[in-house]
Image (spheres, rainbow, N blue to C red):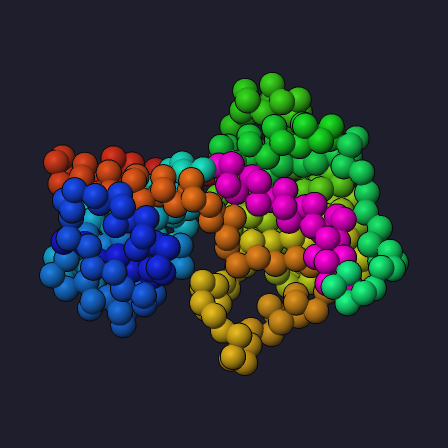
Amino acid sequence: MARVISTRTYDRRFLAAANNAQAHKLRFLEARLDATTAVAASGAQAVCAFVNDDLGANVLGLLWDQGVRLVVLRSAGFNHVDLEAAARIGMAIGRVPEYSPHAVAEHTVALMMTLNRRTHRAHARVREGNFSLDGLLGMDLFGKTVGLIGTGKIGACFARIMAGFGSRLLGSDPQQSAECIAAGLRYVPLDELLRESDVISLHCPLTPATRHLIGHDALSSIKPGAMLLNTSRGGVIDTSAVIAALKDGQLGSLGIDVYEEEADLFFRDLSDEVLHDDVFARLLTFPNVLITGHQAFFTVEALTAIAETTIDNVDCFVATGRPRHPVGVEKLVG
Ligand code: NAI
């Protein structure tokens, strides 16, 4: 028996299809997992969670006390799990290490091209009968320098696409990727990447080492007017520092699919409610900021792969006591 937390209709559809032999009894809950909702896990051996669920020490302990022995994440990122606490109590954690790096890389390109050529503003204008081009000036990406921070699976996909644009590729990552080098990417120190890039795209995980990697110091050394893209995790960027850089023009534009405090906002319809997050509200006022609500992963192919890997993690745990793709404390390094 498993409780599937933070679910929407699309999660139910894809997980029910992957569980086609009805091997597991799944109970779907819309609520986000936290210390209050953890009681809903009573009677379940596994909990299936998403990116904004609280999997801190307290919640893991509450789940364990109710008999839960496995937490399967429907995500690649695991920055929201207290892995040390999980290891201490013996809770197994599984994840989906790879589903569709294309989905995220292609969404990054969508953010970049929309910001660059202002297609969102052009669309709104044309519908109003306004065919003026003022304010829509973009740049050729051919020959421009694109810097990738993180060149793993998603970074490699993004590098291949940008090689197709004819951009010059720079990378920063403690682990070099042969695929990226083959796409023409050159590894350079982070400060050189920041100094030289017209577009900076973040594809590293959120770890203690990458939290606020893009803060006041990094932003003061970027090429004035550069574009910053973040489809990794909100915490890699210091949002207040980014707002200051947008205000003084040092940062030319910002495209984000993730936000530091997104847990209280994303994946819900809040259109009838007052927005309480003043930092997010400030971001919304900039004409050169484009925000999507953590949808980079949201393709049919990715949801199919997430559901199949999640069910496989549970199958494997039942058979061997370990999920197919476990996450342990060793992953915290880096
Ligand atoms: P990956 O593990 O294949 O690659 C991550 C790369 O970042 C690795 O090569 C690693 O060495 C590098 N890295 C680690 N620390 C670094 C640092 N300090 N500086 C530069 N590079 C560093 O992971 P993948 O699949 O490419 O995903 C990357 C991230 O994208 C995930 O951790 C997740 O947070 C995010 N993501 C976002 C999604 C969305 O819907 N917006 C969906 C899926 C993933």
On screen, residue 303 above or below 180 = below
Q: Where is residue 276? Give x, y as percent.
A: 54, 77
Magenta span: 101-125
Residue 300 rendering spot, x and y as whole percentages: 43, 44
Magenta portion: prevailing SS class = helix
**Residue at the (77%, 63%) spot, across then down:** 125
Q: Which of the two residues, 176 or 13, is positioned nearer the viewer here?
A: 13
Does residue 228 appear in the picture of this structure? no
As for residue 105 lying within the magenta part, the answer is yes
- Residue drawn at x 54%, y 25% as measured from the top left: 176
Seen at 83% across and 64% down, the residue is 130
The answer to whether one can see residue 163 in this image is yes
Query: Is 130 within the magenta?
Result: no
From the viewer's perspective, is residue 225 above or below residue 61?
A: above
Quadrant location of residue 311? top left
Above or below: residue 131 compared with residue 104: below
Residue 133 in picture, x, y percent from top left:
87, 56
Q: Could you tell whether 197 is left or right of 209 in the image?
A: right
Q: Where is residue 197 shown, x and y percent of the image?
A: 74, 38
Number of marks present in the image shown? 0
Nearest the eye: 100 or 68: 100
Residue sitting at x 55%, y 32%? 157
